[in-house]
């Protein structure tokens, strides 16, 4: 067992973990935040996307011990302290960007990180940025629309068409 | 206060979203219990082998292990095998399907033992420590080879060809010999892996001394599971509760009664502990049902000027190593749509179900109807090519004339309503068909490396499963009804208990819209409860594009029952006769004196406190409806796909995709559009990318998401959607269903487009999926095999 300390959504968690423990299972089972989902075992689907030190990471590709001393952000921290939704969450709601909802936390975390890098993307760029996140329900169309909408809202510009 | 706004037909935002966006979904892997233990199924790396010895001693010694069990150890746990509920013929040969195999491994997902341990990791470690000694047998996954019976999967059945079902035909069968034009084609449709992004999983717990058990499962069918798992485990239906929590997609893959569900219940009974099982994705690829896996020999009889006289299809269908819940019925479900939307005179369809050493097949989005539509629409294109006509012209001249009352088709069942030509014309208009043909001609003329192809797909589907009497005639053992219970709480809140079990379809929203309109309340005052057999006791669940047409109609009828009772109470309170009341502006009002009124909230409160009800009226305002549809519903539509094919690489890019569907009336157009998007994306995946590939030893080569190409946002285009509306005559809502339309329509539209792009090069056949390699090889073959 290895002693680690990871800050998750601003709260420091010290724990003993098996070296083989994946970050996603540390978040889900030891921290108890189950919003981050697991959809595969080959780092293909992106359902488990979180931010580590602000960068989007598939949390099944990282061992918990590799995140020792780092800052992890999950879907649970996206809403404001008053419960208000993040612009991406609002946009996914407004544009029907989710159906079963299983890929959604990963999609939102991936999109948040991407919009941080590129606040005014084209639709093609948004599609490229989602290449590592699979959805089986929506055909991606309303996910792309949601992210374009959120980009507009977040930059304060008029919503693009 | 009465709510007078109309919600049905509006793109109301979803009530389901808030918790899912917040990461607060109740998916199965988010559920945990005190004392919970983990189950892992041991699936040795064999495809076909007799089991010589299972040594569980090392596994039992792994720290944290509570028990390791083989089939022999669980002999008394399963009075029956896993259920198959559609014995489609009298002489069908049905293999016994135990939750753990006893003697022989017949496919890679066959479990031979099960481990229960304190943690997930311990269970995984122990499962790996189980030693299985087995004698490897030759394996067969090719259909024609399996049909020779050189390798027999179930010796007690004596053959792999376990079922032969024939529609029997309609019309004059001699046309398939004598028509002026005969087109014959063979089409192969490989197996597909459904890939709901949430794998399966379940949690079983109970009170062994009382014999009471609960199973929380990522399932589409809690109500059917209660019956099936009761039969498999011997737990009384009256002591078995099934809960479907938030479920992360299904597409038919969770429309089943699975071995792991029966095992978890049996082990909860045996160990007295809550038992949880979560499927890994790699496990999902072998242990959860596959779809498709069929080969059709097709004949079209037509005339030189383009009339389709008849179509005939003889199919081989891969059943896999066992029957799951509906396996042999899936091809038959397609067996009623092989005429497409066309007014043909002759019809023939039959299939043979063949066992192989592969994962059982079963319902995958569309279930039989995509398979049928693919071959019909590919065949119509082949016909058009043969007689040198535009495939759009051939389709239009053969479309069935419009009908608003049920009409009998050449395949023998009644269609509820249809008007195909406006849908067809609109699709061509949106695709800019004529202009695109001109661009195509110019590209062909110039010999451009990138050639344009246009693919059409006009489909009809059979939805709203299903009229129970017809199901009975088709030897399906259950009914096709659904139910809704509406409870009006005092002061204005309404609870709907629906028998449907949504897993992404948004029934909480859509059913709220129906109830809000009917009862004059806000959708926010309506709560829709679903997916728990102890809460929503009556139901037949969600599959087959049935929920709105059957379960939604049950909701509408339950609303009417509530209003009948409410009217009696209103008349009593307003001291008028019932016929002096009218329902206007969301309340019962006295005719001529609309201010004298009672809303549903008023009447629910009166019925609840029951201080002054009429003497013959029972307290509480509620209504229950069980609706058995008089017919299937028959959506239809036309999709058009425009592609660019790189003739040097074989790569295809979709440049335009148009879907025009007629699904009857629409409850929530936003949700409907989303379903079409998703369905089309799955159809594009089927057409261009996805295929379960086996090697000659029967090993699944596409064994994980890294080898099996589920498309990303990069591969799926932006789609243009539109609708025409021909209301269904089968239900009061006039809805037909939309869950599978995209998946049914898209594969032939896309493959026809790819074929169309290279047909002028002499290509006579394009396989599915139309991968770059397949397209490139087809082009090289057409050139004379130069490569």
Image (tube, coloured by chain):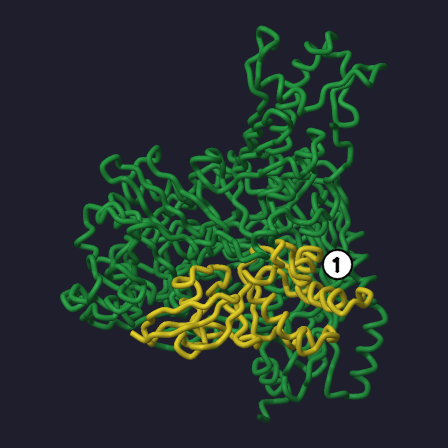
Chain colours: A yellow, B green
Foreground residue among A7 and B146: A7
Q: Position of residue B116 (x, y in %)?
A: 25, 58
Q: How many marks?
A: 1
Name the residue located 54 percent from the left edge and 72 percent from the top edge.
A51
For label 1, the crowd category at 10 Å Cα-Cα, with few meaning under 14, some 14 to 19 and many 20 or more, is some
**Residue A57 left/right relative to B449:** left
Foreground residue among B412 and B510: B510
The quarter of the displayed image where residue B449 is located = bottom right
Q: Can residue B143 be seen from the camera position used here?
A: no
Q: Position of residue A26 (x, y in %)?
A: 40, 67
Above/below status of B618 relative to B627: above
**Residue B668 left/right relative to B230:** right
Q: Secondary structure at mark 1?
A: strand
Q: Position of residue B549 (x, y in %)?
A: 62, 40
Q: Position of residue B756 (x, y in %)?
A: 71, 74
Above/below status of A129 relative to B111: below
Which chain does the residue under circle 1 lie in?
A: B
Name the residue located 81 percent from the left edge and 57 percent from the top edge.
B425
Above/below status of A2 relative to B40: below
**Mark 1 = which residue?**
B721
Q: Can residue B468 be seen from the camera position used here?
A: yes
Above/below status of B672 relative to B499: below
The quarter of the displayed image where residue A42 is located = bottom left
Instruction: Identify the image quadrant of the C terminus of chain B.
Output: bottom right
Instruction: Identify the image quadrant of the N terminus of chain B.
Output: top right
């Amino acid at each position: 067992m290895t002693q680690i300390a990871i800050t998750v959504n601003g709260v420091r968690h010290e724990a003993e973990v098996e070296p083989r423990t994946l970050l996603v299972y540390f978040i889900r089972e030891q921290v108890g935040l189950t919003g981050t989902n697991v959809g595969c075992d080959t780092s293909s689907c992106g359902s488990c996307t979180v931010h580590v030190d602000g960068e989007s990471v598939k949390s099944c590709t990282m061992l918990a011990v590799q995140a020792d001393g780092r800052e992890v952000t999950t879907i649970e921290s996206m809403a404001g302290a008053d419960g208000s939704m993040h612009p991406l969450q609002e946009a996914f709601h407004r544009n029907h960007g989710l159906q079963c909802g299983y890929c959604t936390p990963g999609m939102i975390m991936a999109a948040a990180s991407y919009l941080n890098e590129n606040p005014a993307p084209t639709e093609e760029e948004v599609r490229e940025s989602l290449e590592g996140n699979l959805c089986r329900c929506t055909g991606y169309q309303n996910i792309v629309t949601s992210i374009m909408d959120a980009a507009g809202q977040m930059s304060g510009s008029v919503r693009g068409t | 206060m009465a709510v007078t706004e109309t919600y049905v037909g509006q793109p109301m935002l979803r009530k389901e979203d808030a918790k899912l966006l917040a990461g607060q979904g109740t998916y199965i892997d988010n559920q945990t219990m005190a004392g919970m233990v983990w189950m892992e199924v041991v699936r040795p790396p064999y495809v076909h082998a007799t089991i010589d010895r299972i040594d569980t001693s090392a596994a039992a010694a792994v720290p944290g292990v509570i028990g390791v069990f083989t089939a022999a150890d669980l002999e008394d746990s399963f009075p029956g095998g896993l259920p198959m509920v559609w014995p489609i013929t009298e002489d069908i040969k049905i293999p016994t399907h135990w939750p753990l195999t006893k003697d022989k491994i017949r496919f890679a997902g066959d479990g031979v033992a099960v481990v229960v341990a304190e943690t997930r990791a311990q269970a995984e470690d122990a499962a790996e420590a189980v030693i299985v000694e087995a004698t490897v047998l030759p394996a067969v996954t090719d259909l024609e080879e399996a049909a020779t019976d050189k390798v027999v999967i179930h010796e007690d059945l004596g053959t792999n060809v376990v079922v032969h079902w024939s529609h029997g035909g309609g019309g004059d069968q001699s046309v398939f010999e004598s028509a002026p034009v005969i087109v014959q084609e063979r089409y192969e449709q490989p197996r597909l892996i459904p890939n709901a992004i949430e794998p399966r999983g379940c949690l079983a717990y109970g009170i062994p001394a009382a014999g009471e058990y609960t199973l929380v499962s990522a399932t589409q069918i809690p109500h059917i599971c209660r019956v099936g798992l009761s039969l498999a485990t011997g737990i009384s239906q009256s002591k078995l509760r099934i809960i479907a929590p938030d479920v992360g997609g299904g597409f038919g893959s969770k429309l089943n009664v699975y071995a792991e569900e029966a095992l978890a219940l049996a082990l909860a009974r045996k160990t007295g502990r809550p038992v949880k099982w979560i499927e890994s994705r790699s496990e999902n690829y072998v242990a959860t049902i596959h779809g498709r896996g069929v080969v059709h020999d097709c004949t079209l009889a037509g005339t030189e000027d383009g009339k389709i006289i008849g179509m005939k299809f003889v199919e081989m269908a891969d059943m896999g190593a066992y029957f799951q819940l509906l396996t042999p019925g899936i091809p038959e479900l397609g067996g009623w749509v092989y005429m497409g939307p066309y007014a043909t005179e002759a019809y023939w369809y039959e299939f043979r179900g063949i066992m192989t050493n592969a994962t059982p097949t079963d319902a995958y989005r569309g279930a039989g109807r995509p398979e049928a539509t693919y071959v019909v629409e590919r065949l119509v294109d082949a016909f058009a090519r043969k007689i040198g006509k535009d495939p759009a012209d051939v389709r239009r001249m053969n479309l069935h004339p419009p009908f608003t009352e049920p009409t009998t088709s050449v395949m023998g069942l009644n269609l509820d309503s249809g008007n195909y030509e406006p849908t067809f014309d609109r699709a061509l208009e949106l695709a800019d068909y004529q202009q695109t043909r001109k661009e195509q001609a110019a590209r062909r003329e110039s010999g451009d490396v990138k050639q344009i192809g246009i693919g059409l797909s006009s489909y009809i589907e059979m939805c709203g499963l299903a009229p129970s009497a017809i199901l009975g005639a088709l030897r399906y053992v259950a009914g096709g009804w659904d139910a809704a219970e509406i409870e009006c709480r005092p002061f204005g809140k309404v609870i709907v208990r629906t028998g449907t079990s949504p897993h992404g379809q948004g029934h909480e929203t859509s059913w709220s819209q129906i109830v809000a309109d009917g009862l004059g309340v806000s959708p926010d005052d309506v709560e829709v409860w679903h997916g728990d057999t102890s809460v929503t006791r009556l139901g037949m669940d969600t599959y087959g594009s049935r929920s709105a047409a059957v379960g939604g109609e049950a909701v509408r009828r339950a609303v009417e029952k509530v209003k009948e009772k409410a009217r009696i109470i209103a008349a009593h309170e307003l001291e008028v006769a019932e016929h002096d009341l009218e329902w206007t502006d969301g309340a019962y009002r006295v005719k001529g004196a609309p201010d004298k009124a009672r809303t549903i909230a008023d009447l629910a409160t009166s019925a609840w406190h029951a201080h002054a009800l009429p003497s013959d009226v029972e307290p509480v305002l509620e209504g229950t409806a069980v609706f058995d549809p008089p017919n299937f519903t028959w959506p239809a539509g036309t999709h058009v796909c425009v592609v660019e094919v790189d003739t040097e690489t074989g790569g295809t890019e979709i440049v335009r995709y148009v879907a025009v569907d007629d699904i009857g009336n629409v409850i929530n157009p936003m949700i409907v559009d989303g379903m079409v998007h998703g369905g089309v994306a799955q159809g594009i995946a089927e057409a261009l990318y996805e295929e379960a590939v086996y090697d000659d030893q029967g090993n699944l080569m596409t064994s994980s998401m890294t080898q099996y190409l589920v498309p990303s946002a990069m591969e799926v285009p932006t789609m243009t959607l539109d609708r025409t509306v021909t209301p269904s005559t089968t239900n009061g809502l006039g809805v037909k269903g939309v869950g599978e339309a995209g998946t049914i329509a898209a594969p032939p539209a896309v493959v026809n487009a790819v074929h169309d792009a290279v047909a002028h090069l002499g290509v006579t056949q394009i396989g599915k999926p139309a991968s770059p390699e397949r397209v490139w090889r087809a082009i090289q073959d057409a050139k004379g095999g130069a490569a």
